[in-house]
Image: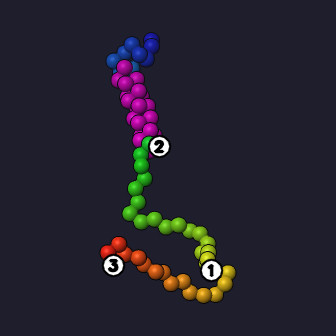
Amino acid sequence: MSLNKTASGKIILSILVFTYLAVIGVRLRRNFSQIQSAQAFINGDTVFVRASIPGELMLQLKYAHQ
């Protein structure tokens, strides 16, 4: 007596197929969904960049309408 030929066998097989497809769907959704974050933090070392000679830089701004 085969499991697929009885009514209960078809129901069990349908449940197994549906469960299998649901698991595949959930895994695909997790793999292809985008991660959205309201805040982001980057852990790393702080590097200070300094000039090799002491001094100050003064920027001279030029305007189009003088």
Question: What is the CA distance from the residue labelled 3 to the residue labelled 2?
Answer: 57 Å
Camera-side residue: 50 or 62?
A: 62
Name the residue carrying label 3. 66
The outermost residue toward the right is 52
Residue 41 drawn at (x, y percent): 49, 67
Amino acid type at circle 2 is Asn
Q: Which mark is residue 50?
A: 1
| Classed neighbour count for the residue bearing mark 2: other residues with Cα under 10 Å, few (<14), some (14–19), many (≥20) | few
Are dots 1 and 2 in contact, CB under 8 Å? no
Residue 49 colored magenta? Answer: no
Camera-side residue: 23 or 8?
A: 23
Residue 40 drawn at (x, y percent): 46, 65
| Classed neighbour count for the residue bearing mark 3: other residues with Cα under 10 Å, few (<14), some (14–19), many (≥20) | few
Residue 30 drawn at (x, y percent): 44, 44
Q: Which mark is residue 31?
A: 2
| Classed neighbour count for the residue bearing mark 1: other residues with Cα under 10 Å, few (<14), some (14–19), many (≥20) | few
Is residue 23 visible in the rendered image? The answer is: no
Which residues lie in the magenta part?
Answer: 10-31
Is residue 35 visible in the rendered image? The answer is: yes
Of mark 3 and mark 2, the one earlier in the sequence is 2
Give the structural element (helix, strand or loop) at label 1: loop
Query: Which one is in front in this view, the residue at disc 1 or the one at disc 2?
Result: 1
Give the structural element (helix, strand or loop) at label 3: loop
**What residue lies at 42% left-to-right and 78% top-to-bottom?**
61
